[in-house]
Amino acid sequence: MLNLGIVLLHQGQLAEAQSLLETAEKLAPSDPQIREQLGHVYLQQSNFTAAQVELARACELDPGKSALHFLLGQAYKHLGQTKQAESEFAISAKLAQNNASSSSR
């Protein structure tokens, strides 16, 4: 379901992707990838509150993934929550820098 949801998301079939990903989320509520993709769907639908909820949960489940923090920052920014957005962007930058320095060793 996750992979098909991603394909539908990339094809712009947001309602279909959302439906599949919501079903997948019920089956695997602790899967950060599912929550990340739902966050993408909600961002594209301009449903920033729902995106923030999903992306915050994804960050809790996979706190070391810089892209999740960046996406959460985007949701906060659209919601007008500037301080939270800046905090998430800073976390994202720090994680990306740490990952880059770790891979160059």
Image: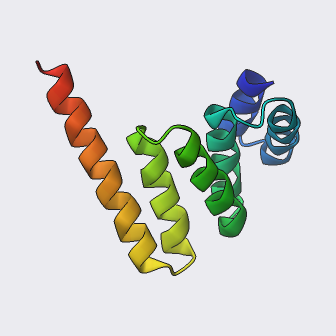
Q: Give whichever of 92, 16 is nearer the camera.
A: 92
Where, by quadrant of the figure, is residue 58 drawn? top right
User: Residue 90 vs residue 15: left or right?
Assistant: left
Q: Residue furthest top?
A: 105
Where, by quadrant of the figure, is residue 79 drawn? bottom right
Q: Position of residue 20 (x, y in %)?
A: 85, 35
Task: Specify the color scheme.
Answer: rainbow
- Quadrant location of the N terminus in the rendered image: top right
Q: Give whichever of 16, 97 is nearer the camera.
A: 97
Tell me the residue at 81%/44% (across/down): 18
In the rendered view, tell whether residue 56 sits above or below residue 63: below
Q: Could you tell me how many numbered marks the image carries?
A: 0
Tell me the residue at 35%/69% (across/down): 86
Tell me the residue at 67%/52% (across/down): 54
Q: Position of residue 72 (x, y in %)?
A: 51, 57
In the rendered view, tell whether residue 14 sits above or below residue 83: above
Q: Position of residue 43 (x, y in %)?
A: 63, 58
Tell me the residue at 74%/26% (across/down): 2
Q: Give whichever of 37, 53 is nearer the camera.
A: 53
In the rendered view, tell whether residue 23 sits above or below residue 102: below
Q: Position of residue 91 (x, y in %)?
A: 33, 54
